[in-house]
Image: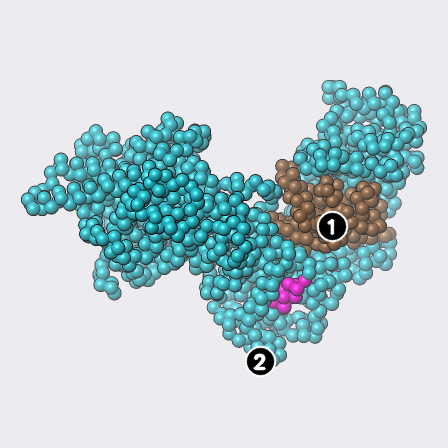
Chain colours: A cyan, B brown
C-alpha cells in the first residue's frame, strides 16, 4: 500500500490510529521475548508436526498472555505509531486466551478487530485463535467478528486473499509479505477445522444457537466453489434445513422488516428459510435436479422477502435452461391470485426484477409452444410489471418486452419484441395491483406512476411505456436518466431489427383507433391467449377515450424529451442519449437534428475519449442493423473526424468508412465516398477560433495535439480515397471500355477533364480532391496524396491515367503550384526545389507511367505493322511482348495491388497476344515467367498440365465454393468471422457488438492522445510492410520493427509503402509474391526469408494465416478471386496450379449461375438482369462478374458486368 | 454481478474496497478510474447526490456522503438503477453506523462496524440485505426476524 499513500505519506492504519482520542489501544507493546520469538519463529520444516505447531502456538500464546495482565499488556498509547499487522495478530492470540474476561472482549471488539479489518483479510495463522474464540466466547459482538474473519479465510483465493494494492492509495495492508512466516500455518491446515466447526454450528438446531446457526451458514458459503467436498456438505445442510422448514405453509405478513409479529416458531422458521435460500443462491446452479427446483419454488411463498428474492432469482436462472420444468412447477403459482401475483406487491425491487425476467423466459420459451395458456399468463404478468412503481422494475419489464434479455438475442427476437411493444395490450385482471408505495426506493419516489381507474382499461403497451419513459426523462436523478436513455436505445435496436427483417409492416403514421371502438375485439383477442407473434394480427393501438394518436406521434414526443436530456451535465448520460438517438434514427428520417446535436456535443472538451469511441462503435452497430444507413452514419462519423480527431480511434473510424462504403451498395457508393473524403475539403484549423463551434463543417482542433491528430486523420482519409476510389467509382483499367488509343487523342487537358468527369463523376471528384491534397496540406499528406494518385492512375483506364500523368508531371516540375496554392494557407514549410518536395517521390511514378505508355505505343505500332504486312506474330516476338508485359506488371505491382491475371499494362489490345503466348507455353497467369517450370522450359514439355491441375483444383474449389448468402453477409460486413482476423479495429467492434467488456477502463492520461495507436505516420510505414505477413511469422514482425531506419527514408520505403497499408482496402490484400525481387533487394535478409517462407506454402496457403486474410475480404469474394490472391511467383507447383486454375475455368469449363435479384445496368458495360435468369459467368473482378446471357435481355445486351452478389454461382 | 464497492476519502485514498469477480490485475485500473471520476465530479457534490458512469457494459454509480466518496460498480442485472438501490442501502447503513454523514475521522472510528454492515449488504457479489434495521440486527449477531 505504501505506494498508495504517497500523496499523504500515511497509511490507512496511520489514519485510523492517528487520533489520540481513539488510538487508545493500538496494540500491546512488543510481547515478551519468549512469546514473540515463538510467534515469529520460522516454521520448522517438519511437516508432520504442523498440528503440533498449531497447538504449540496456542499454548504459548495462552501462557504468554496469562503471564501478563492483559490490561497491562496494552500499556501506553503509542501516539501516531501505527500498529502493524503482526501486532494485531499477536493481540488476538493473547486476547483469545482470556476471552472470558470482559475487558478482553471489549478490547477485541473496539480495537483489535476493527483495525484488523483494514487488512481486507487475515492469514491462516489467526484461525486457531479465532476458532478458540468461536468455541469459548459468548459475546455476540466478538462472535460476529469471528464469523466475519472465518468467512474471509474461507473465501481467500490466491495470494492469501490479501489483495496487493498496486500503485494507488489503498488500505493495503502494510507488510503482509512475511505473513506466512507467522507460525507457518497454512490454509490447508485450518480450512478443515473451520469448516467442521461451522458445519457443527449450522446444523445445530438448539434455539439458543439460532443466530449463530444463521451466521455460520453464511460464513460457510464463502468457501470457494472449487472444493467439491465442502460444496456437498453445504448442499446437505441447506437441503436439510429446507426439508424441515420449507414445507410449512405460512402467510406472508405485511409489515416492515424485522418487526413482523408472529410466534417464535414461525419467526425461527422464516429466518432459517432465509438463511437456507441465501446459501442456495450462492451455490452453483443445478438445473437438472428436481429437488433444487422444488425448493426454490417453495421459496416463492416464504415469509422473508429476501428469501423470496433469492428463490425467484434461482428460478429465473433455471428457467433459461429448462423452461418447461419450471413452467410446469409454477403452474399453480401463476394462476390468478397465486404466489407469483403476490410478488407484484412484494417490497423488494430485485425480487420483482427477477419476476420480470422469469416471466420473459417462460413467455418466450419454444418448449412451451404447446401451452399458450401458460405463456399468456406469464406475458400478462410481465405486462403488469410495466406499471411497477420502481423504475428499475418497469425498465426491466420494458426490456423484456423488447426481447432484450442478455446480449445474445437473435434479430428475430428483437424484431418480435418491437412488434409486441407496438401491438400488445395490457389488460389488468382486476383492481390495479400496483398501489404499494416503495418508500425505500429513492428512484421510485420521483416517478411513481399512480394507476388510477384508467389503468383498469386495456392499455396499449406502447402508450404505457412512452408515458413512463417521458416521465422518467423529467427526473433529476442521473441514474434514472441514464437508464431511461438506455431503454430508448434498446427500443431503437428492436425497432431496427423489425425493419431489417421486414416483419414490421405497420405504418407508424397511421392513426390509431380510439379505445372505445375496439374494446371488445381487444378483449376477445386478449383472452383467447393468442399471443404468439406469428399468428397475431395487428391490434389497433388505442389511445384512451377520444384520443387519436400514432406510434410515430408517440415516438416523436418521446424523442423530443430525449433530446432535451442532452442538456444534462453528465457526459455519460449525454452519451447514452446520443446512442439512443442514433438507434432511433431511421434511414428515411432527417438527419439534421441529430447531426447538430452531436456537433454541439463534441465541441465540449469534457468528453472522455473512451466514451466517444463508444459512440463510434454504436455507429458500427447501427450500420450492421441497417446497412441502408451507411451514408447517414458516415455523415455522423465525419463530425467525429472533424470535431474530435485527437480523441477517436482512427482504426475504428476507418473500419466504419470501409464497412459503410461496401454496405452502401452500388448506388450509395458515390455518396459514401464523398462523405468520407469531405474530411479533405475542410479548411485547416484556425487555432483559437471560436467561431461556428457548432457548425458541422468547422474543424475544431484548437490545440496542437488535436491539430496533429486531424492531420493524421486526413492522411488516413487520403490513403483511403486512393485505395478505394476505383471501387467506389467502379472504374478499372482492366475493364475500361475506352481503349488507350482513344484517350491519347484527347491531348487537350481541358477536354480530357471534361470527358473524365462526365464519364465518371465519382472518380473525377476523387481525383480533384487528391490533386488538391497533393498541393496543399502538410508534406506527409502530400506524399500520401501522390501515392494515392498513382494508385488510381494504375488502376483506372483512360482518360484518368493520362490526366493523372499530366498532373504528376506538372507537379514534379512545380510549375502549376502557384495556380493551385494561392488560395491555400501555407504551412510555412520549405517546400523544396520543385515547390512540393515530392520530386524524388514522383519521378519513379512518372517513370512507370512513361514505360507503360511507351510500351503501349510500341505495341500499337507493332500491331499495325503486322496487320499491314499481314504477318503472324512469331513466337520470338510474342515472347518479347510477354516479357515486357511481365516487367511492367512487376513494376506496377510495386506501387499498388492489381489483379495480376486481369491487369494489362500494355492495354486491352494486348490481351489476345498475351493469351496466345500463355497458352502456348502453359504459363500460369499469375506466376508468369518467374515460375521455375516456365523458366526452365519444363512447362513446354508437359502436355495437358493445365487439365491435370484443373482437375485437382476442381475438387478443392468445390469445397470452397461460397454460399451466396455468405457472400452477401460478407459484403455487408455481417459475417464477422470472415473479416480479416488482423484488422486492428475489428476486435474492438466485435467486442462491442457482443456487449462484452467488463474489463477495467484505462485511465486516460493526457499523453495518451498523442500516443493513440495506429495513425502515426511511422506506423503507416511499418504497417505497410509488416502487417501483411504478421499472421504467418512472428519473427518477421520483429525483424521488421527492429530496423525502422530501413523504412524511414522516403526513397527506400516508397515501393514497400505502395503495397498497401493495413488500412481497410476494398482490394483484398496484396498477394505475398508481388514484387518479390525488388522488395527483397530493399529489405533485410530476414524479410527476404519471410517472403520465401510465405511462398513455399503452396496450396496450404489458404489457411487462416494466409495473407489474404490480412484485411477484410473485399466485395469480390468469389472463389476465383481468392485463388488469385494466393498466386505467388516463387511458389512451386502448388502456386502454379493455383494460377492456372483461373484461366482454366474461364476457357474450359464455364461457370454457370443464376440471377438472384433484378439488376438494372448503371453503365454501358453493365448488364441488366432479371431474377431467376440463367447466366454464364465468364470471369470475376472486384465484386463484379462478367456474365453472358442465353438471350438478350430487356436492354438488348447479351453480356456485361453484374455485381457478384446478384448472381448465385453454381 | 456487483463487481466492486469502494470507499475513498476526499483525497482519493481508498478506505474500503470489496471486489468480486474482478481479476487482480484489473483492480488497479478500476481504482484509478473511479478515483479520477470522483476527483472530476464529486468536488461540489451534494450529500448523497447520485452520479452515474459506464464503461462498456459495466455501470458505475457513485456518491458523496460526508467526507467519504462511495462507488459501486456492477454489470448485468446490477445496472444504474440497481446500483442506486445498492448505494442507497450502503449510505443509509453507514449513516446508521455513524449516526450522521461521516467525517473521515468518524468513518475510521466506525471502521469495523461499517465493514460488518457491508458484509451484510454485499455478499459474494450480490445484494443481500436492504433494510437498515435488519442489517443492524445482523451485525450484532441477532437473527433477521426476532425470535
User: CA–CA distance between discs 2 and 1?
Assistant: 54 Å
Provide residue A215's location: percent of width, then percent of height: 80, 44
Residue B57 in view, yes or no: no
Provide residue A7's location: percent of width, then percent of height: 71, 36
Instruction: Please name the residue shown 63% across and 40% down the image.
Output: B29
Instruction: Please name the residue shown 55% across and 71% down the image.
Output: A553
Whether residue B124 is in magenta: the answer is no
What stretch of residues is rendered in magenta? A466-475
Numbered circle sitting on residue A48: none
Chain letter of the residue beneath label 2 in the structure image:
A
Circle 2/circle 1 CB separation < 8 Å: no
Say which residue label 2 marks.
A517
Instruction: Please name the residue shown 52% across and 63% down the image.
Output: A593
Provide residue B91's location: percent of width, then percent of height: 77, 51
Instruction: Please name the residue shown 37% across and 26% down the image.
Output: A1085
Which residue is nearer to you in this view: A876 or A1047? A1047
Provide residue A432's location: percent of width, then percent of height: 70, 70
Answer with left or right where residue A1091 lies relative to residue A859: right
Query: The N terminus of chain A is located in which quarter?
Result: top right
User: Where A877 sits versus A653, above or below?
Assistant: above
Chain letter of the residue beneath label 1 in the structure image:
B
Q: Name which quarter of the figure residue A197 lies in.
A: top right
Answer with left or right where residue A735 lies relative to residue A245: left
Eye-nearest disc, 2 or 1? 1
The reply to the same-chain question for discs 2 and 1 is: no
Which residue is nearer to you in this view: A421 or A342? A421
How many other residues sit within 10 Å of disc 2, few (<14), some (14-19) or many (≥20)? few
Numbered circle sitting on residue B64: 1
Q: Secondary structure at mark 1?
A: strand
User: Where A531 sits versus A950, above or below?
Assistant: below
User: Where A963 sits versus A388, above or below?
Assistant: above
Amino acid at each position: 500500500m505504501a505506494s498508495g499513500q504517497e500523496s499523504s505519506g500515511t497509511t490507512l492504519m496511520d489514519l485510523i490510529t492517528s487520533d489520540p482520542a481513539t488510538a487508545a489501544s493500538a496494540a500491546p507493546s512488543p510481547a515478551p521475548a519468549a512469546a514473540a520469538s515463538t510467534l515469529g519463529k520460522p516454521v520448522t520444516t517438519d511437516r508432520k508436526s504442523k498440528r503440533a505447531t498449531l497447538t504449540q502456538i496456542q499454548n504459548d500464546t495462552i501462557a504468554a498472555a496469562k503471564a501478563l495482565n492483559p490490561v497491562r499488556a496494552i500499556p501506553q498509547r503509542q501516539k501516531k505509531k501505527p500498529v502493524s499487522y503482526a501486532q494485531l495478530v499477536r493481540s488476538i492470540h493473547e486476547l483469545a486466551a482470556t476471552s472470558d474476561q470482559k475487558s478482553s472482549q471489549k478490547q477485541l471488539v473496539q480495537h483489535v478487530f476493527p483495525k484488523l479489518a483494514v487488512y481486507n483479510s487475515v492469514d491462516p495463522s489467526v484461525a486457531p485463535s479465532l476458532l478458540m474464540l468461536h468455541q469459548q466466547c459468548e459475546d455476540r459482538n466478538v462472535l460476529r467478528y469471528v464469523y466475519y474473519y472465518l468467512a474471509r479465510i474461507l473465501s481467500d483465493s490466491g495470494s492469501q486473499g490479501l489483495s496487493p494494492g498496486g500503485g494507488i492509495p489503498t488500505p493495503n495492508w502494510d507488510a503482509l509479505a512475511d505473513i506466512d512466516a507467522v507460525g507457518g500455518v497454512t490454509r490447508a491446515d485450518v480450512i478443515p477445522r473451520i469448516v467442521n466447526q461451522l458445519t457443527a454450528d449450522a446444523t445445530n438446531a438448539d434455539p439458543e444457537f439460532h443466530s449463530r446457526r444463521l451466521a455460520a451458514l453464511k460464513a460457510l458459503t464463502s468457501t470457494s466453489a472449487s472444493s467439491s467436498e465442502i460444496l456437498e456438505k453445504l448442499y446437505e445442510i441447506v437441503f436439510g434445513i429446507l426439508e424441515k422448514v420449507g414445507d410449512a405453509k405460512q402467510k406472508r405478513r405485511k409489515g416492515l422488516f424485522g418487526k413482523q409479529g408472529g410466534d417464535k416458531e414461525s419467526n425461527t422458521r422464516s429466518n432459517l428459510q432465509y438463511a437456507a435460500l441465501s446459501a442456495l443462491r450462492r451455490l452453483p446452479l443445478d438445473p437438472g435436479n428436481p429437488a433444487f427446483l422444488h425448493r426454490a419454488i417453495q421459496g416463492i411463498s416464504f415469509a422473508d422477502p429476501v428469501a423470496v428474492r433469492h428463490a425467484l432469482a434461482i428460478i429465473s436462472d433455471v428457467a433459461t435452461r429448462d423452461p418447461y420444468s419450471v413452467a410446469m412447477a409454477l403452474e399453480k403459482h401463476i394462476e390468478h391470485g397465486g404466489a407469483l401475483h403476490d410478488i407484484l406487491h412484494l417490497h423488494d425491487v430485485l425480487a420483482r426484477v427477477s419476476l420480470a425476467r422469469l416471466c420473459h423466459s417462460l413467455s418466450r420459451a419454444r418448449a412451451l409452444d404447446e401451452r399458450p395458456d401458460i405463456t399468456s399468463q406469464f406475458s400478462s404478468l410481465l405486462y403488469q410489471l410495466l406499471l411497477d412503481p420502481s423504475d428499475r422494475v418497469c425498465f426491466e419489464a420494458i426490456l423484456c418486452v423488447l426481447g432484450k434479455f442478455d446480449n445474445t438475442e437473435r434479430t428475430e427476437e428483437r424484431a418480435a419484441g418491437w412488434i409486441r411493444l407496438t401491438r400488445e395490450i395490457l389488460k389488468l385482471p382486476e383492481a390495479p395491483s400496483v398501489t404499494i408505495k416503495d418508500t425505500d426506493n429513492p428512484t421510485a419516489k420521483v416517478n411513481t406512476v399512480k394507476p388510477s381507474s384508467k389503468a383498469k382499461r386495456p392499455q396499449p403497451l406502447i402508450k404505457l411505456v412512452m408515458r413512463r419513459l417521458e416521465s422518467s426523462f423529467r427526473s433529476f436523478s442521473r441514474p434514472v436518466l441514464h437508464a431511461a436513455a438506455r431503454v430508448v436505445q434498446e427500443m431503437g435496436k428492436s425497432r431496427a431489427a423489425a425493419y431489417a427483417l421486414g416483419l414490421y409492416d405497420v405504418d407508424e403514421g397511421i392513426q390509431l383507433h380510439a379505445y372505445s371502438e375496439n374494446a371488445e375485439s381487444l378483449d376477445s383477442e386478449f383472452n383467447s391467449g393468442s399471443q404468439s407473434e406469428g399468428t397475431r394480427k395487428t391490434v389497433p393501438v388505442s389511445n384512451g377515450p377520444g384520443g387519436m394518436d400514432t406510434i410515430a406521434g408517440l415516438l416523436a414526443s418521446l424523442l423530443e424529451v430525449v433530446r432535451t436530456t442532452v442538456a444534462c451535465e453528465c457526459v455519460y448520460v449525454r452519451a447514452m442519449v446520443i446512442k439512443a438517438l442514433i438507434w432511433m434514427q431511421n434511414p428515411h428520417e432527417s438527419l439534421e437534428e441529430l447531426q447538430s446535436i452531436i456537433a454541439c456535443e463534441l465541441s465540449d472538451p469534457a468528453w472522455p475519449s473512451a466514451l466517444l469511441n463508444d459512440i463510434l462503435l454504436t455507429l458500427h452497430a447501427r450500420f450492421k442493423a441497417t446497412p441502408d444507413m451507411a451514408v447517414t452514419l458516415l455523415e455522423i462519423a465525419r463530425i467525429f473526424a472533424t470535431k474530435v480527431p485527437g480523441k477517436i480511434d482512427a482504426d475504428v473510424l476507418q473500419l466504419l468508412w470501409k464497412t459503410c462504403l461496401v454496405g452502401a451498395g452500388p448506388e450509395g457508393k458515390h455518396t459514401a465516398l464523398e462523405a468520407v473524403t469531405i474530411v479533405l475539403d475542410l479548411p485547416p484549423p484556425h487555432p483559437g477560433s471560436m467561431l461556428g463551434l457548432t457548425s458541422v463543417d468547422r474543424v475544431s482542433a484548437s490545440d496542437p495535439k488535436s491539430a496533429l491528430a486531424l492531420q493524421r486523420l486526413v492522411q488516413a482519409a487520403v490513403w483511403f480515397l486512393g485505395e478505394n476510389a476505383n471501387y467506389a467509382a467502379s472504374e478499372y483499367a482492366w475493364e475500361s471500355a475506352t481503349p488507350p488509343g482513344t484517350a491519347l487523342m484527347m491531348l487537350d487537358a481541358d477536354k480530357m477533364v471534361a470527358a473524365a468527369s462526365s464519364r465518371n463523376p465519382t472518380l473525377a471528384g476523387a481525383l480533384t480532391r487528391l490533386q488538391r491534397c497533393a498541393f496543399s496540406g502538410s508534406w506527409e499528406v502530400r506524399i500520401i496524396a501522390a501515392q494515392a494518385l498513382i494508385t488510381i492512375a494504375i488502376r483506372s483506364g483512360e482518360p484518368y491515367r493520362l490526366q493523372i500523368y499530366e498532373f504528376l508531371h506538372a507537379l514534379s516540375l512545380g510549375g502549376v503550384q502557384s495556380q493551385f496554392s494561392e488560395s491555400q494557407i501555407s504551412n510555412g514549410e520549405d517546400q523544396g526545389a520543385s515547390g512540393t518536395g515530392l520530386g524524388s517521390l514522383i519521378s519513379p511514378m512518372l517513370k512507370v507511367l512513361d514505360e507503360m505508355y511507351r510500351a503501349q505505343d510500341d505495341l500499337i505500332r507493332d500491331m499495325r505493322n503486322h496487320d499491314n504486312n499481314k504477318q503472324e506474330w512469331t513466337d520470338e516476338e510474342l515472347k518479347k511482348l510477354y516479357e515486357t508485359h511481365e516487367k511492367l506488371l512487376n513494376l506496377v505491382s510495386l506501387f499498388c495491388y492489381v489483379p495480376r491475371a486481369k491487369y494489362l499494362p500494355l492495354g486491352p489490345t494486348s490481351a489476345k497476344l498475351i493469351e496466345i503466348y500463355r497458352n502456348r507455353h502453359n504459363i500460369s497467369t499469375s506466376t508468369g515467367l518467374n515460375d521455375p517450370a516456365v523458366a526452365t522450359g519444363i512447362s513446354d514439355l508437359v502436355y495437358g498440365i493445365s487439365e491435370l491441375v484443373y482437375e485437382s483444383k476442381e475438387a478443392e474449389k468445390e469445397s470452397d465454393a461460397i454460399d451466396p448468402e455468405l457472400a452477401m453477409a460478407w459484403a455487408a460486413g455481417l459475417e464477422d468471422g470472415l473479416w480479416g482476423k488482423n484488422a486492428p479495429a475489428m476486435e474492438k467492434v466485435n467486442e462491442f457488438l457482443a456487449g462484452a467488456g467488463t474489463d477495467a477502463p484505462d485511465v486516460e492520461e493526457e499523453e495518451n492522445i498523442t500516443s493513440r495507436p495506429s495513425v502515426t505516420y511511422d506506423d503507416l510505414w511499418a504497417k505497410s510492410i509488416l502487417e501483411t505477413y504478421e499472421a504467418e511469422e512472428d519473427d518477421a514482425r520483429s525483424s521488421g520493427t527492429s530496423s525502422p531506419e530501413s523504412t524511414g527514408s522516403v526513397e527506400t520505403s516508397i515501393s514497400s509503402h505502395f503495397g498497401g497499408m493495413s488500412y481497410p482496402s476494398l482490394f483484398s490484400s496484396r498477394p505475398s509474391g508481388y514484387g518479390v525481387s525488388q522488395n527483397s533487394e530493399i529489405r533485410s535478409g530476414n524479410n527476404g526469408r519471410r517472403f520465401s517462407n510465405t511462398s513455399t506454402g503452396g496450396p496450404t496457403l489458404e489457411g487462416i494465416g494466409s495473407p489474404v486474410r490480412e484485411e477484410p475480404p473485399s466485395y469480390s469474394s468469389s472463389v476465383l478471386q481468392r485463388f488469385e490472391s494466393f498466386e505467388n511467383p516463387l511458389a512451386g507447383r502448388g502456386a502454379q496450379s493455383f494460377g492456372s486454375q483461373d484461366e482454366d475455368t474461364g476457357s474450359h469449363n464455364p461457370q454457370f449461375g443464376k440471377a438472384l435479384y433484378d439488376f438494372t445496368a448503371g453503365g454501358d458495360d453493365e448488364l441488366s438482369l432479371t431474377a431467376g435468369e440463367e447466366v454464364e459467368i465468364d470471369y470475376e473482378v472486384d465484386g463484379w462478374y462478367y456474365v453472358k446471357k442465353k438471350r438478350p435481355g430487356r436492354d438488348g445486351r447479351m453480356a456485361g458486368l453484374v455485381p457478384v452478389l446478384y448472381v448465385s454461382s453454381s | 454481478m456487483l463487481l466492486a464497492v469502494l470507499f475513498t476519502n476526499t483525497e482519493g485514498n481508498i478506505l474500503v474496497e470489496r471486489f468480486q469477480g474482478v481479476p487482480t490485475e484489473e483492480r488497479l485500473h478500476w481504482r484509478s478510474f473511479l478515483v479520477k471520476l470522483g476527483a472530476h465530479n464529486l468536488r461540489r457534490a451534494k450529500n448523497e447526490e447520485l452520479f452515474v458512469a459506464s464503461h462498456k457494459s459495466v455501470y458505475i454509480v457513485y456518491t458523496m456522503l460526508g467526507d467519504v466518496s462511495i462507488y459501486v460498480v456492477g454489470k448485468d442485472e446490477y445496472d444504474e438503477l440497481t446500483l442506486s438501490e445498492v448505494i442507497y442501502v450502503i449510505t443509509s447503513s453507514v449513516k446508521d453506523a455513524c449516526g450522521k454523514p461521516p467525517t473521515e475521522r468518524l468513518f475510521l472510528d466506525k471502521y469495523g462496524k461499517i465493514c460488518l454492515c457491508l458484509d451484510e449488504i454485499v455478499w459474494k457479489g450480490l445484494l443481500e440485505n436492504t433494510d437498515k434495521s435488519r442489517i443492524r440486527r445482523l451485525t450484532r449477531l441477532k437473527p433477521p426476524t426476532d425470535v
